[in-house]
Amino acid sequence: MSRAHALHILVKTKEEAEAIKKELDAGKRFADLARQHSTCPSGKNGGDLGEFRQGDMVAPFDKVVFSKPTLEVHGPVKTQFGWHLIKTLSRG
């Protein structure tokens, strides 16, 4: 089974996620913005979710992590938890 290591930022609205993505595009650090904005407990760790297996996360999140290019920020992605910006660090 495939494994991945990813970071994410979780917020309540698509607009908030889009605003944070603009900051990332302007060169702000993902970990800093995760600490500032993410509503997920992983925000304290810069959004780091550690390593997980395919199928461990909710389907829309899983799909991005296991199909989109690594080391790029993807999103906003909607799940039942809110809106995510996702950066997959490695996959294998």
Image (spheres, rainbow, N blue to C red):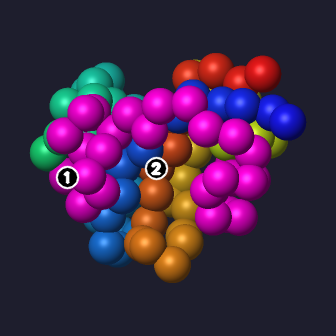
Q: Residues within 10 Å of mark 1 (few under 14, many from 20)?
A: some
Look at the picture and state if 45 lies above or below 11: above
Based on the picture, tell me whether residue 46 belongs to the magenta stretch. yes
Residue 77 at what x, y percent from top left? 56, 62
* Amino acid type shown at disc 2: Leu
Say left or right for 5 vs 27.
Answer: right
Above or below — where is 82 with respect to 51? Answer: below
Residue 21 or 45: which is nearer the viewer?
A: 45
What residue is pinned by disc 2?
Answer: 85
Horizontal placement of 68 versus 52: left or right?
Answer: right
Q: Secondary structure at mark 1?
A: helix
Q: Quadrant of the C terminus?
A: top right
Q: Residues within 10 Å of mark 2 (few under 14, many from 20)?
A: many
> Label 1, label 2: how many angstroms apart (C-alpha)?
11 Å
Left or right of 22? Residue 1 is: right
Answer whether residue 19 is visible to the viewer in this image: no
Kindly identify the residue that appears in the image at 36 percent across and 49 percent down.
9
What secondary structure is marked by label 2?
Answer: strand
Give the quadrant of residue 49: top left
Q: Is residue 29 left or right of residue 59?
A: left
User: Residue 53: image x %, image y %?
Assistant: 70, 40
- Residue 79: which quarter of the image? bottom right
Q: Residue sitting at 25 percent across and 33 percent down?
A: 45
Who is closer to the viewer here, 15 or 54?
A: 54
Q: Which residues are magenta?
A: 37-64
Report x, y in % for residue 90.
64, 21
Q: Is residue 71 above or below residue 63?
A: above
Q: Which mark is residue 37?
A: 1
Q: For residue 59: magenta? A: yes
Picture quadrant where residue 30 is located: top left
